[in-house]
Image: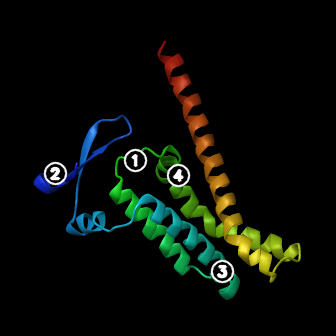
Amino acid sequence: MHSVVMKTGVLPMYDEDGNEIYAILTPYQQKIEKIPLNTLSLSVLVVVGVVLEALECNMFGDCQFYIGSYLIVFAMMIFAIKHPSAEWKLLTHLGRDLSMYIYIFHIAVGKVVDISAKNAHWWGKNPYYIGRPFLVMALSLLLAEVIWQSKKYITSIKMKKCVNADS
């Protein structure tokens, strides 16, 4: 695969049906491929990022960006560039199907969690601040999955009606 990249400047990739497609690699992406981090190192970096993010949330309270978040994104980006054809169905589903909904709703979910924490008298306590990012992430994922599954179900009903109308 690396010889293909060096000769043509493109990296073979595959669409969801398994057809080969090509993405142009920038010089930066080729340099990133050479970063000497293996899958275990990247996994450790993600775990460190998650722990650091929880600590930052506890220390600084609610803020938009944490250093731990950048470590997580960095490790995932390196992994994706180094392993472009990796078949991770869960990550593919999260990225392709749920990411837009997560992006749109995570702030609102966080506000609902905060209001609920204030009503339950958890606000301002260390366990709440440490657990908040995980709770917001889990609830955002759950909401995104419910929306996506609902959309998929409604689309299938519409398709059945179209097929029945044509017969």
Spatial CA distance of label 4 from label 2 is: 31 Å
- Outermost residue on the top side: it is 167
Q: Residues within 10 Å of mark 2 (few under 14, many from 20)?
A: few
Query: Which of the two labelled residues, at mark 3 and mark 1, occupies the earlier sequence position?
Result: 3
Foreground mark, 2 or 1, reads: 2
Spatial CA distance of label 2 from label 3 is: 43 Å
Looking at the picture, how far across and down is residue 47, in whole percent?
57, 67
Q: Are marks 2 and 3 in contact (CB under 8 Å)?
A: no
**Residue shown at 63%/70% (left/top)?**
107
**Residue shown at 40%/61% (left/top)?**
38
Residue beneath disc 3: 55
Q: Are marks 1 and 4 in contact (CB under 8 Å)?
A: no
Foreground mark, 4 or 2, reads: 2
Q: Are marks 2 and 1 in contact (CB under 8 Å)?
A: no
Asked if 83 appears above or below 150 in the picture, the reply is: below
> What's under tag 2, amino acid-wise?
Ser
Of the numbered discs in the image, which one, if any, rests on residue 94? 4
**Residue shown at 65%/47% (left/top)?**
146
Residue beneath disc 2: 3
Foreground mark, 2 or 3, reads: 2
Spatial CA distance of label 3 from label 1 is: 31 Å
Residue beneath disc 1: 86
- Outermost residue on the bottom side: it is 60
